Structure formats: structure tokens, C-alpha cells
Amino acid sequence: MSTRSTGCASGGSRHEPARLRGSPGDAETWIKAPEARPGREAPDGAFTARLTIDVTPDQRARIKIAAFQRGVTVADMLRDLLGREFPPAPEGDTP
């Protein structure tokens, strides 16, 4: 694989696969950096929908630190959290 460009705030080229972008060299810089634009397709091939919430700068930093420590993206970590909190309804049940 070719070497990574540093032309993007996340440390990688805009044309790199998302799994290679955003690998932090310095946690403090990564935490303060804007989020990279996510893809429109989930790893399992399902279409994804965008959800926007307002959080405080302190909450955002804590979320990014937790993701960094776990070695995952913020989006993946929050998708897992939401999946645990709001599991799919059993067949035939409608909320």
C-alpha cells in the first residue's frame, strides 16, 4: 500500500479508505480535530442514516478519548452503544 499523505486534518489523504484515516499520531491533536466525513454505507452493507446531536466540548472530548483508548472510531463506538441501548424489536412487534 502506498504511503499516507498528510494533506488532511485527520492525518491521511481524503482518498484513503476510512479505516486508514484518523489514526492518531498525537491524541491531543486528534481529539481537537474535526470529525472525518463518514461513508454512507455500514460495514455490513446496510444504508446508514445521519443523526446529529449537540454535545458540550467536554463531552465531545471525553467521547473521543474513550474511542481512542478502545481503538475504534467515534461513530463505531456510538453505533455499538445505541445498538445495545435500542436493540431491534422482535419479529411482529412494532414500537
Image (cartoon, rainbow, N blue to C red):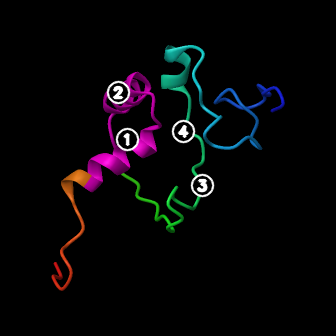
* Residue labelled with disc 2: 66
Q: Nearer the viewer, residue 63 or 77?
A: 77
* Residue labelled with disc 4: 35
Residue 18 appears at what percent x and percent y? 63, 43
In this rendering, the label closer to the viewer, 3 or 4: 3
Q: Do labels 2 and 1 touch, CB within 8 Å?
A: yes
* Residue labelled with disc 3: 39
Whether residue 80 is in magenta: the answer is yes
Residue at position x 39%, y 22% from top?
Answer: 69
Residue 55 appears at what percent x and percent y? 33, 40
Residue at position x 36%, y 50% from top?
Answer: 79
Q: What amino acid is found at the position of numbered circle 4 in the picture?
A: Glu
| Comes first in the chain, label 2 or label 4 | 4
Q: How many marks?
A: 4
Local crowd at mark 1 within 10 Å, few (<14), some, or many (≥20)?
some
- Tag 3 secondary structure: loop
- Tag 2 secondary structure: helix
5 displayed left or right of 75: right
Residue at position x 24%, y 68% from top?
Answer: 88
In this rendering, the label closer to the viewer, 4 or 1: 1
91 displayed left or right of 30: left
Q: Which mark is residue 77?
A: 1
Local crowd at mark 2 within 10 Å, few (<14), some, or many (≥20)?
some
Q: In this picture, which residue range is highlighted in magenta? A: 55-83
Q: What amino acid is found at the position of numbered circle 1 in the picture?
A: Met
Q: Is residue 4 above or below residue 54?
A: above
Residue 2 appears at what percent x and percent y? 84, 30
Q: Is residue 9 above or below residue 76?
A: above
- Tag 1 secondary structure: helix
